[in-house]
Amino acid sequence: MKHLVALSLLAADFSNLRADIEMINNSDADWFHLDIMDGVFVPNISFGVPVVECVNKYTRKPLDVHLMLAEPDKFIDTFHQLNASVLNVHYEACTHLHRTIQRIKSLGMKAGVTLNPHTPVCLLEEIIGDLDLVMLMSVNPGFGGQKFIENTIGKVSRLKELILRKNAQTLIEVDGGVNLETGRRLLDVGVDVLVAGNFVFKSENPVETIKKLKML
Ligand code: DX5
Ligand code: ZN
């Protein structure tokens, strides 16, 4: 499979969100990546339901929702109604992860589990076969524009090994500090989906930058 690129809206210009949404619609990006933060699970608050409703009105690409919430279970139905295609919950926030994953899948969404930088891949040993996607955080969640954590490269290899050993179909996504250099190295070790925020939005020509990430 050719890798996918998911654009994180966190780095967009919220005073002119529609323009950035149209830019992504008209680019080679595959998914919209929406970072939902509650100020409890992570030390920041991003945006919530009214903004996602507006995004939803204009996007022509699947929504990849990243829930950085202390109680993600409370919002599974909400994001289903908001048209999420992929719903990512953090391993660290889910006491009954198996139940959470089954609930997400029963509503027809793809279920993703996200691991913070310190959370080892081996904790997914018993659940990997149920997961459509695993997202590895390559920065500590809460903010865009941070530096890529090098340990992620080895972690992707360990995750790939687990997926192959269990004969699972799980996709690997990486979120944080992705640019052309880190992106290339991530693809070399088996990443399927690259999330990019600041690298695209701060570039001179975002559409061109997305194209370059797609052509890696
Ligand atoms: C961080 C978010 C990321 C972030 C990525 O908590 O989950 O999706 O927006 O942004 P960059 O690409 O700027 O690191
Ligand atoms: Zn994210």
Image: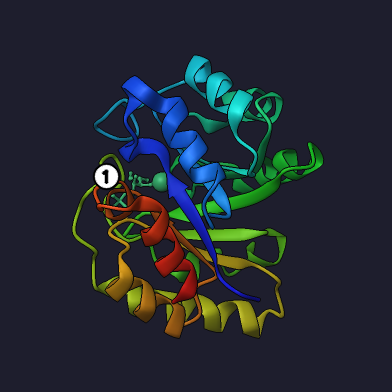
Q: Position of residue 71 (x, y in %)?
A: 49, 29
The residue that mark 1 highlights is 144
Residue at x 53%, y 32% (from the top left corner): 72
Give the class, few, some or many, for how many residues have Cα within 10 Å of label 1's Cα (few <14, many ≥20): many
User: Amino acid type of disc 1?
Assistant: Gly
Q: Tell me, what colour scheme is on the image?
A: rainbow
Residue at x 63%, y 66% (from the top left corner): 128
Of residues 183 and 148, the one drawn nearer to the viewer in this rendering: 183
Vertical placement of residue 211 versus 26, above or below = below
Q: Would you say residue 38 is visible in this rendering?
A: no
Q: Report the quarter where the N terminus lies.
A: bottom right
Q: Would you say residue 211 is visible in this rendering?
A: yes
Q: Is mark 1 within 8 Å of ligand 1?
A: yes
Of residues 145 and 180, the one drawn nearer to the viewer in this rendering: 180
Residue at x 64%, y 22% (from the top left corner): 78
Instruction: Tell me which corner region of the image, top left, top right, bottom left or bottom right, holds residue 157.
Output: bottom left
